[in-house]
Image: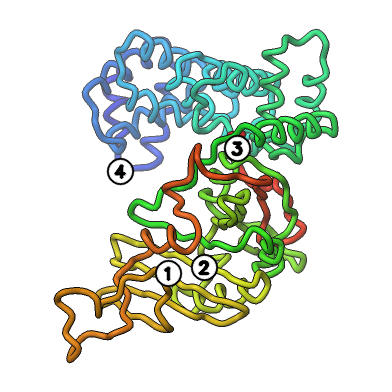
Amino acid sequence: MKIESLLEDLDSDDAARAAAAAERLAEQADSVVPMLLRGVADVQRTVDLKPVMRVLKRIGPPAFDALLAAWRRKELSDWQAGRLLGVFDERSADQYAALAADPDFGKSEDGFQGLVRLRVDSEAGLTALVGCFARGRRIPYKAPDYARELHDSFRPRLRSLRRDPAASPRIRRGAMAALVAGGGADALDDRDRAAVERLIRVKILDEVPSLPSTTLSAWWMAVPGASYEGVFEALGLHDRRPVTVAAGVQASESREIQVPGPDGAVRTVGRAFITPELNGWRLIFGSFDLLVGDPWDGMIETVERVSLHCGQAQFFFLDDAGGSDVWIVAENGRVIRQYAAEGDPEWEGDPLPWETLAVDEPNFNPEYDEANAGTTGARSACGYLSVDPGEVGPHTEVRGHGWLALTAPGVGHGAFPGTLRI
């Protein structure tokens, strides 16, 4: 039967007929694959690629090589090649590994995407992973995923490579980075873990702190530096470790993870970053849902509870898109002043000495306006109350170091994916 007729049968509604056509076409791979690839040059929709995908998958490694060669000759777009490369099975695992080792970022990403999908443990895959992290610069997005998927299998070999005197320093560094990407600092042996901890303490001494931007949306808390230790119990934080501000900020902005609990049920865990002492105050950043909870009642309850442990606590919440602007001050377990603007601003408690009040404004109308109404939102109030995150920098007085802690016990920092910039 002619190739053209078989290609027509690929689109048949008859599943048996389409499968038979794919089988016959696979038997003629040398002539079929180039024809198929030429035929998709103008295709722009994944659905139109599916008949070709079935044949390429059936052929396997030879089709992979032909596809890659056509891509390198720029006969296929990156999008087309990426879609077609996603069809191959375990027979092409080493080809995916070779592609993952390609110095071209896009091709390496497609290689790691295939390795993640197949979850195949191979020396070629391990070598590609180490080489990728050894090169540094841009890391393909799927490389850390592959490190995590195969971490249990790769960890002993990566640790051995870290101590291999025959391996170059660059490769040993790549092995260390792959270990951390797969299992966090907990994946390192005692020697490497101690080295990382020493590096963190050295970096802390010379670090210029830079905190998350409050543009568009943000939340944070502030507690006195002298009594900040109470925040760990107040927020239910565990396994705290010294951390640089850069790493703490990155960790606090990352997503929560889900892990099995002691009873087998899935639980959600996040991270909290407690800054060094900044002009006499410590700030807390992290997962709003896990550290605060309900958007309003949770704010009040949390700031009161933290103030009970720390003497005073301040809470700030901004959501420019939703129109929310909130700041709350509590002392010894009781809110003493709060400002909440979501539409019309509302105030509770006595004005604080630094506040500009509505009664002092030229347009104040005692018939309609509240005399104790303040006019300052969270972005300005934080600078009067404690520390403005946007003003933290070279001139900020810094004492001590930051802490990274978890919202649940028995999880370990290694459970969180990715590496942190020290």
Disc 3 vs disc 2: Cβ atoms closer than 8 Å?
no
Q: Could you give the CA–CA distance between mark 4 and mark 2, rounded to whole angstroms?
A: 66 Å
- Name the kind of residue labelled 3 in the image: Leu
Element marked by disc 2: strand
Between label 4 and label 1, give the one nearer the viewer.
Answer: 1
Q: Could you give the CA–CA distance between mark 3 and mark 4, rounded to whole angstroms?
A: 51 Å
Question: How many other residues sit within 10 Å of disc 3, few (<14), some (14-19) or many (≥20)?
Answer: some
* Label whose residue precedes the other's in the sequence (2 or 1): 2
Residue 396: horizontal and vertical position, in percent?
52, 44
- Name the kind of residue labelled 4 in the image: Asp
Residue 325: horizontal and vertical position, in percent?
35, 67
- Check disc 3 and report the residue beneath it: 420
- Check disc 2 and report the residue beneath it: 314
Disc 4 vs disc 2: Cβ atoms closer than 8 Å?
no
Classify the position of the N terminus by image quarter.
Answer: top left
- Name the kind of residue labelled 2 in the image: Gln
Residue 138: horizontal and vertical position, in percent?
49, 24
Element marked by disc 1: strand
* Label whose residue precedes the other's in the sequence (3 or 2): 2
Question: How many other residues sit within 10 Å of disc 1, few (<14), some (14-19) or many (≥20)?
Answer: many
Q: Is residue 6 left or right of residue 283?
A: left
Q: Is residue 171 left or right of residue 324?
A: right
* Label whose residue precedes the other's in the sequence (4 or 2): 4
Q: Who is closer to the viewer here, 239 or 356?
A: 356
